[in-house]
Amino acid sequence: MGKAKNLKKRVSSYFRKNTRLLEKTAILVAQTEHIKAVPVESEIEALLLEVNLIKKNKPKYNILFTDSKSYPSIKITKEEYPKILVVRKTDDKKAVYFGPFPSAPQIKSVVTMLRKIFPYQSVVNHPKRFCLYYYLDLCPCPPMFIAEAEKKEYKKSVLYITSFLKGKCKRVLSALKKERKRKAEQELFEEASRIQKQIEAIQYITSAVHKPFEYETNPNLHVDLRKEETDALLALLQKNGVGIDSLARIECFDISTLSGIFSTGGMVVFVEGKKNPLSYKRFRIKREQETQKPNDFAMMEEVLRRRIKHTEWPFPNLIIVDGGKGQVSSALSVLKDANKKIPIIGLAKREETIITSDFRQVLVPKNTPSFRLITRIRDETHRFAITYHRKLRSKAFLGTYA
């Protein structure tokens, strides 16, 4: 039982002629009757699945791996405020264990990533005061809980961690998205934003390109992944006739409105594949338009005209508009009037579809570097635009909108 990126290459290596195998491996190959593969989305999911399957099936050739005294495990205690610990003994019948894991660095990587998403107590006897990890947003310090909301939130986080370690990542994401929607509907935007960050973190560590244990050998992994995404999108656009030679700076525009009231536009900037919040801009659509029938195309055109006038801002290598042919046409009209030649694409409602400046539809395969970059840009632009829109609505409700 094992995991591999390239199963064909891994398995075939055992059956080649003249391949010298260890005695144990030779016996294993000789006794193999059939091979079953379980595809997963990422390396961390592969690790968790392998650990759970070995613990469940106890294959004889993984005998050392099933010895909880030889390898570290994750322990979740059963008490009012559960603790999450890394241990080598699994003799507490009241606790829940995950593992054992093949190495200490791997288990450290898993718990470190989880703790950044869902802070938890990691010591048996926590002092009755706020600890250092509290100020790093890694420990909520249960002994200091006062409000019932704090207690419920902590228990919910432990449930999410438990589900994640069981390999139920999609279930965790689904629950978080429902919770985010409820918070947004209640206009608890800070809480909704916090949940959104948890969602993004889980999506990132479970993405097909994420290599959680490679950071130890490649400190520049994050930069490498962003470069892979921009290179892939650049190649896709060039292949489909978009005249572009760089994606060093991307600007994406989105309109947020409610029946034409308090309409806003958002501009986010990605530099070398990474968001650059210091360059974000927001636009309040002119008030006289808000008394008329809402027109998404006209609003997009207004925002882009106002942006183009700011020659002190660096111009992008690519403009992305959230929308289809109508929004792309509006953008083209603005650039033509301003005598600017900047490549433009639109993001259609079908999230895997790009609209080029000659109105061709280009499908972006899911789970590819290009798709991940486009999705991240779209989500960030939508978040930024709708945040300003809701701020204006709140001001109007409080009577401070002008």
Image (cartoon, rainbow, N blue to C red):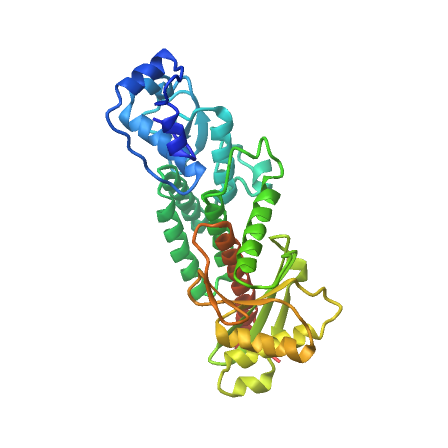
Q: In this view, does 366 lie above or below 73?
A: below
The mark total stands at 0
Q: In this view, does 93 lie above or below 369?
A: above
User: Who's the residue at 39% across and 16% down the image?
Assistant: 18
Query: Where is residue 330 shown, x and y percent of the image?
Result: 56, 78
Question: Which residue occupies the foreground of this view, 15 or 65?
Answer: 15
Q: Residue 344's image quarter?
A: bottom right
Q: Residue 249's image quarter?
A: bottom right
Q: In this view, does 290 lie above or below 367?
A: below
Question: Which residue occupies the foreground of this view, 27 or 1?
Answer: 27
Quarter holding the N terminus is: top left
Query: Where is residue 81 shown, x and y percent of the image?
Result: 41, 38
User: Who's the residue at 55% across and 70% down the image?
Assistant: 357
Q: In this view, does 209 lie above or below 100?
A: below
Query: Where is residue 39 shown, x and y percent of the image?
Result: 35, 40
User: Who's the residue at 47% across and 53% down the image?
Assistant: 195
In this picture, residue 47 sits left or right of residue 338: left
Quarter holding the C terminus is: bottom right
Query: Where is residue 365 shown, x and y percent of the image?
Result: 44, 54
